[in-house]
Image (spheres, grey):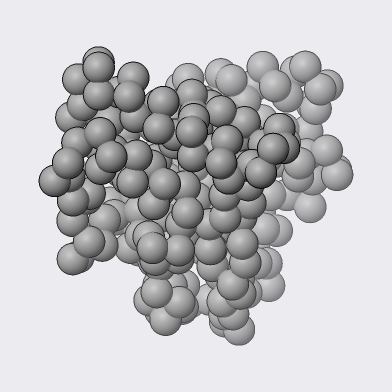
Amino acid sequence: MRFLDLASGSGALSLPAARIGAEVVAVDLSPVMIRRLAERAKEEGLSNLKGRVMDGHALELKDNSFDLAGSQFGAMLFPDLPRALRELVRVTIPGGRMFLVVYQHPRMVEFLGVFIGAIQHVVPGFTGPPMDPLPLPFQAADPEVLRQLMEEPGLRNVRIEPAVERLPFSSGKEMWDWVTNSNPIAREMATGLDDEQRFRVRQILDERIQERSGGHDTAILEAAVHIGIGTK
């Protein structure tokens, strides 16, 4: 199976797909991410995984060339998501499938709520990011919006399946690093803090991770997601 991973990052989805035998092309706008993905593929001897720096709004790939194409927590960040979905459909073979994995409403994404709560503890009066309209990463949070976005470029038999992502964190620093490096909303909030406030937020996160872990090594935070799947 030929699989296109759009906005792949450093390989969270591409690597498992390559391990089970898919011929994977991973594309991302960030050269840093693609370099890291290439390093990880080389370390595992995955010659069936290739990374390319590319804009997901305008894929430099042939029509009808992938059995499966999709994006996990990547395309949802695109400023022109409909255009990116048209590109994904274009490069998928007739009868092939396309999918998107996106977060549900922010209130159902636990790591974001914990992160905002820690900032509010340190900065009284902080209200968090505006939620009307929802921030860009949540543009497809509504299942009917996601369905419509996938049907507009011509996908058939679209179904939206709810699921839960479970994220383990062992310390406040680990959570801070992961959230601020993977989520543009958190990164923007962190930018507005001074060094002392950032230090205190990490301390609060550490306390809450320890409380949540119940004496175990890690705490598990859950995030509700939707998986949209359709056929070309």
Whether 228 is drawn above or below 195: the answer is below
Residue at horizontal 25%, vertical 17%?
A: 196
Between residue 88 and residue 216, name the one nearer to us: 216
Left or right, 72 with respect to 201, comes to right
Between residue 129 and residue 83, name the one nearer to us: 129
Left or right, 184 with respect to 128, comes to right
Residue at horizontal 67%, vertical 58%?
A: 68
Determine the image quadrant of residue 11.
top right
Determine the image quadrant of residue 138.
bottom left
Residue at horizontal 44%, vertical 30%?
A: 176
Between residue 98 and residue 168, name the one nearer to us: 168
Q: Hey, which residue is sitting farthest left in the picture? A: 125
Answer yes or no: is residue 192 visible. Answer: yes
Between residue 89 and residue 163, name the one nearer to us: 163
Determine the image quadrant of residue 198.
top left
Give how far across and how far down residue 47 sits, in percent. Answer: 79, 26
Q: How many numbered marks, from 0 up? A: 0
Give how far across and how far down residue 230 sits, in percent. Answer: 59, 74
Left or right, 170 with respect to 137, comes to right
Residue at horizontal 71%, vertical 32%?
A: 217
Whether 109 is drawn above or below 14: the answer is below
Answer yes or no: is residue 25 visible. Answer: no
Quadrant location, the C terminus: bottom right
Give how far across and how far down residue 146 sits, in percent. Answer: 43, 72
